[in-house]
Amino acid sequence: MTTKNKIGSVLKLAVPIAIGLASGYLMVFVDLFMVGKLGNDALAALGIAGFTHAMMLSLVAGVTPAVQGIVARWMGEGNSQPKCLPLNGGLLIALIIGIPLSIICHYFTPAYFAFVSSDPVVVAEGSAYLRALILATLAIGFMRAFIGFWAGMSRAKVIMVIEILMNVVNAVLNYMLIFGHWGAPAMGTEGAGIASAIAYVFATTLFFIMTFLMMKAEGFLTILPGKKLLIALFNRGIPAIFQELFFAAGFVVLFMIISMIGSEEVAAATVLTRITIIMLLFAMALGMASSTLVSNALGKGEVDLANHWGWLTGVIGIFTITLFGLPMLIFPETVLSIFMPAGKALEIAVVPLQLIAMTNGVVSLVYIFSITLFSIGHGTAVLLVSFVLQWLIFIPAAWFVGPHLKMGLLGVWVAYTVYTLLATLFISMIWRIGKWKTAHAV
C-alpha cells in the first residue's frame, strides 16, 4: 500500500468520525453561543458546569477505547465470536456505573457548586445547567459504547449521521428553551442543559435502533460477555477512566484558580477551552482512526505496520490542525467576537487564543497516541505522565503565576502551554519506545 493510499485509509476513518464528533461538540458551542447572550455570569457558570460534567462522565469514558480496541483487533484476527460481544460488555459497564453516578451527582450538585464558586449567580445558573445534563448520564455512557463499537468496525459514517441528527435536535431545543420561543418557557442556562440532555437520549435511542437492525445476527443484546472479555474491557477502560477523571478534575480546579483572578477571566477561559476542544476534535478523530488501524494490524501480527499507522496519523494531525489554527492566530478578535461580546473578557482572551493556535498542531500528538494506547491496553504510562504533569506541575504553577504573582489569565495560559508541550514530548516518547507492541489478544 502506497503512502497516498495509507493517508486515504486514515482519512476515510477519521473524517466521518471528526464530522460526528464536531457535530456532537457543536452542541457545546451552540450552548456557548446562545448562553453567551445572557452575560458573563452565565458564561462562567457554563464553563464550570461543562468541565464538572466532563469529570463525571470520565467514569464511563473508558468504554469507548476498550470496546473499539477489542472489536478492531477481532476484525484483524478474523475472530469468529459474535462481533457485538464487546459492545454488550460496554453497555453493561455503562449501566452499572451510570445509574448510581446519576443519583449521587444530582443530589450533591448544589453543594458542589457552592464550594467551587463564591458568586451566587454563577452557583444558581451552573447548578441548574448541570443538574439538567446529569439526567442524560446513562444515555451518554451507552452512546460511548456504541461509538467505540462502530469505530472498531470501521463504520464511522454511522457515528457521523447520528451525531449530526443529535446536534440538530439540540440546536432546535436550545432556541426554544433558553429564550422561550414557540410557546416554551424561557429557562436560560437550565434550558440549555435540558436541551442537551434530550438530544443525548435521542442519539442513544437511534444507536440502539440502528445497531439492532444492522447487527442483530451478531449477538446484540442477546449474549452476555464472558468473564475474560469483561476483564479485558476493564483493563483497557480503567486507565482511560482515571486519565479522563484527573484531566477533567484538573480543569475544574483550574477554573477555581481563575475565579480567584476575576469573573471576566473565567468567562474568557470558558471560551478559550471550548475553542481548544473544537480545534482538537480532529486529533480525537485521528486517534480513534489510529486505534482501529493499529488494533487491526496487531490482530494480523503486523507490528511494524501498526507502528507506522501511529506515526502517519500523527503527521496528518500536526499538519491539518496547524492549518485550522491559522485564522485564530491572524484574526483572534474576530474569532472571539463570535462567542463573546466586546469588552475586557475578549481582550484578555486574545493572546491566549494565539498561543492555542500556534501549539495545538503539535499537541494533537497527545490525543492521537493516548487514544491509541488506551484502546490497545497500554494506557497506564499515559495516565502516569498526565497525572504528574497536570497535578504536580501545571496546577501549582497556574496558582503561582495567576492569583499569587497576579500575572492574570495570560500567565496561567503560558503555564498551560508549557504543560501541553511537555505532555506531547513524554507521550510521544512512550509511543516511540514501543512497549505497546507486545499487546496480547483477548
Image (tube, rainbow, N blue to C red):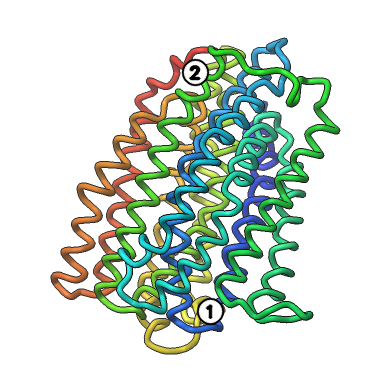
Q: Is residue 251 above or below residue 178?
A: above
Question: Sequence order check: which comes first, mark 2 or mark 1?
Answer: 1
Image coordinates for residue 359, horizontal then vertical, percent? 40, 58
Q: Quadrant of residue 150?
A: top right
- Kindly report the distance in space between the C-alpha atoms of the residues bearing marks 2 and 1: 44 Å
Residue, far right:
213
Q: Is residue 290 visible?
A: no
Q: Residue at x 72, y 49 (%)?
A: 203
Q: Residues within 10 Å of mark 1 (few under 14, many from 20)?
A: many
The C terminus appears in which quarter of the rendering? top right
Q: Quadrant of residue 269?
A: bottom left
* Residue that mark 2 sits on: 231
Q: Which mark is residue 36?
A: 1
Q: Is residue 341 visible?
A: yes
Q: Is residue 194 above or below residue 175?
A: above
Q: Quadrant of residue 24?
A: bottom right
Q: Is residue 158 above or below residue 112?
A: above
Q: Residue at x 63, y 39 (%)?
A: 142
Image coordinates for residue 385, horizontal then vertical, percent? 30, 38
